[in-house]
Image (cartoon, grey):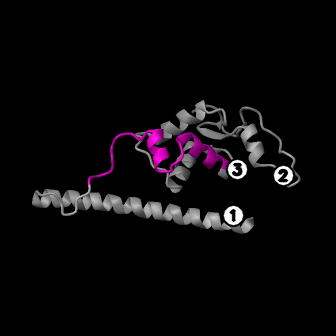
């Protein structure tokens, strides 16, 4: 099993790198097409319109194999094994290749986290998986479930934001 896990991790890292390269290339292509239009006043040869600018719906994401916001956030928190700040959650989503047209993705992370029963607030703008979800993924080798935390996990930070 360890071999499969390490292979999965290597492939995930490659996927993240390839997604970053693809996004970078798409931005460069869009910039080059815009420069061509401005310079020559013509549509560039082989022109491909830019990505859709409308907001993607869960149905759109399901069609391209991308998980919903909720599932993606729960996966990130489960993989981390610790509470994460919303900026860390968003960065992990970006690193995994998650795409969105959200104008404010950090606000989207918070909006979903506060409404999902699988996620609890553990500090200012910091969230973790609730005990029921966490204990299933953190079962010990002898089959015993780990201790389940209370509904709100205490943090060394104050609750003032």
Rounded to the nearest whole Å, what is the CA distance between mark 1 and mark 2? 17 Å
The front one of 60 and 126 is: 60
Residue 128 x/y as whole percent: 67, 41
Numbered label attached to residue 140: 2
Q: Earlier in the sequence, mark 2 or mark 3?
A: 3
Q: Could you tell me if the residues under marks 1 and 3 are in contact, i.e. CB atoms within 8 Å?
A: no
Farthest-out residue, left: 41
Q: Secondary structure at mark 2?
A: loop
Badge 3 marks a residue whose secondary structure is loop
Look at the numbered discs 2 and 3 and tell me whether their residues touch, using CB distance below 8 Å: no
Q: Is residue 68 left or right of residue 145?
A: left
| SS at badge 1 | helix
Q: Which residues are magenta?
A: 49-78
Which residue carries the number 1 mark? 5
Queried whether the magenta region covers residue 44, the answer comes back as no
Q: Residue at x 89, y 53 (%)?
A: 142
- The residue depicted at 48 percent of the width and 39 percent of the height is 58
* Label 1 to label 3: alpha-carbon separation: 16 Å
Q: How many marks?
A: 3
Task: State the residue position of label 3.
Answer: 81
């Amino acid at each position: 099993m360890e071999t499969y896990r390490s292979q999965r991790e290597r492939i995930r890292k490659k996927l993240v790198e390839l997604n970053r390269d693809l996004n970078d290339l798409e931005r460069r292509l869009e910039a080059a097409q815009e420069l061509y239009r401005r310079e020559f006043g013509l549509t560039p040869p082989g022109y491909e319109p830019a990505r859709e600018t409308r907001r993607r719906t869960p149905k759109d994401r399901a069609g391209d194999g991308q998980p919903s916001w909720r599932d993606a956030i729960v996966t990130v928190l489960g993989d981390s094994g610790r509470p994460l700040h919303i900026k860390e959650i968003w960065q992990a989503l970006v690193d995994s290749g998650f795409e969105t047209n959200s104008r404010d993705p950090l606000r989207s992370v918070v909006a979903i986290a506060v409404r999902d029963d699988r996620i609890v607030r553990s500090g200012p703008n910091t969230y973790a998986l609730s005990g029921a979800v966490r204990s299933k993924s953190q079962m010990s080798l002898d089959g015993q479930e780990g201790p389940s935390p209370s509904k709100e996990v205490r943090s060394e930070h104050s609750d003032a934001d």
